[in-house]
Amino acid sequence: MVNTKVCLCGIPLDNPVIPASGTFGFGYEFAELYDIDCLGTFSFKGTTATPRFGNPTPRIAETPSGMLNAVGLQNPGVDAVIEEELPRLAKCFHKPVMANVSGFSEEEYVHVCEKFDAVEAVGWIEVNISCPNVHGGGMSFGTSPEAAGAITAAVRRVTRKPLILKLSPNVTDIVSIAKACEAAGADGLSLINTLMGMRIDIRCRRPVLANGTGGLSGPAVFPVALRMVYQVYEAVKIPIIGMGGVSSAQDVLEMMLAGASAVEVGAANLVNPYACRDIIADLPREMEKYGIQTLSDIIGGAH
Amino acid sequence: MVQGIYTIASNKKIARDVYEMVLSGDTSALTAPGQFLNIKIEGYFLRRPISVCDWDGDTITIVYKVVGAGTAAMSEMAAGQTLDVLAGLGNGFDMRKSGGTPLLVGGGVGTPPMAGLCRRLVAEGKSPTVVLGFASREDVFYEDQFRSLGAEVRVATADGSYGVQGFVTDAMAGIAPSYFYACGPIPMLRAVSDALPADGQLSFEERMGCGFGACMGCSCQTKYGNKRICRDGPVLTKGEVIW
């Protein structure tokens, strides 16, 4: 019997598989299909201080081996998340959940983190400083070490929960940003968010997405994500959640060998709603195939 | 919603760029006409959302238009091949509101869901009138299917090559329905909604990520808050639509 348990910032997970924020809503759609308690945990829909509709449609475009999205952080706002979504989630998910936080100012990040700090069901706070689809917020906080460090330090002051900074791949040097977050008090790092991309409708001669650009995800980005996890693992001591195109148990093993302590699954959930359940079910078989007894032993094993 | 492997029973061209495919498999998740399937096509990342035309027993009929590479690949599939399908997506039409003499309006490939709806309304003893709009004569399909169900059918073509020249609203003259159901391009939906004093339901289309409510890719704003076209729609009521 193989052991799939891992530890993420001091909290044990039955397995390292975590649906990524924005691809799993608040869990209910999936809870209708399978018992979501099989997940390590999941990162719920990115939450801001006030309700947001997000960008105009079309917000989705297909790409070779992937997709672009420009949803733009649609969410009901932190108060509705705490008062309505989380009590509903408590009926179908019985493990600590990961709160995903976004914002348009340092004050907003602090405000939302402070609110989630008071929620018992929240195990970790994942701070998204890498959304490519909003203007004047999101990614602009994650593209320089100074700005990323400043947000990290500010939210660190309002929570004792494990703080995970979610980084953007749309930068020249992700390692320096990762180190800045670690130095400012981050307990962990999530990488990567989506890569900025575009499709153009040839007939209309206009971008397919109403927002013009969108974030690329899916198997197309997996090698880029893997490379960044590998590089950041060499430079920091805090745990990394690896994500970007993960769609199979084999991808999970690769991510962990690159240095990930846990793995988020994003776009795969949208194409196969059972993706995470299937990956979790396949994991022991894949571990046996490669002679892995204890999954946590392979973290960073490719270095 | 169910995920399953469905076998293609037939796949044939019925109008310009328009194909009718009959699938064999689990229909248990289909609860109302106007719902849709989300179909995985080998070699393409996202599934293709296609409205259900009609279903019965263990067969589902869909009618789709070739608009890109994915639907072009579908059009070349043969009987006996299988497809990975999410079935029973979306809310579908609420038939309880129809009254005795509902009007069903289909524009182009918005026509198919009207077929299953029409058959069920007739089975309930209702007398639907069907108005269909197409660009040209070569695009017209299903006129005979509706007629054989006993519905009064009117067809409009934009170029006047078949039926009434103009749009569906030109062919609707003189009809005072108890209620209406419409599926087609947004300008058509709006024109139909504005032209009729009756209440009704309209089926919308949007580019989707998942098709089952997870990704928020197809959201729209309504008078009653944000809705996901895939999950809370695709059918919205006339009273909630913000044009």
Image (cartoon, rainbow, N blue to C red):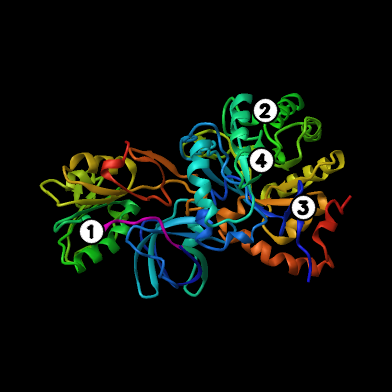
Instruction: State which quadrant residue B99 falls in.
Output: bottom left
Q: What's the residue type where badge 1 is placed?
A: Arg
Residue with the mark numbered 1 = B96
* Chain under numbered label 2: A
Q: Amino acid at mark 4?
A: Ile
Q: Which residue is mark 4?
A: A125
- The kind of residue on which mark 3 rests is Cys
Q: Secondary structure at mark 2?
A: helix
The answer to whether one can see residue B149 in this image is: no
* Relative image position of residue A238 (x, y in whole percent): 81, 42
Residue count near mark 2 (Cα–Cα under 10 Å), binned few <14, some 14–19, many ≥20: many
Name the front one of labels 1 and 4.
Answer: 4
Viewer-side label of 4, 2: 4
Question: Is residue A81 rendered to the left or right of residue A284?
Answer: left
**In the depicted structure, whether residue B241 falls above or below residue B49:** above
> Which disc, if any, is residue A141?
2
Q: Earlier in the sequence, mark 3 or mark 4?
A: 3
Checking the image for residue A7, the label placed there is 3
State how far apart marks 1 and 3 are (Cα): 53 Å
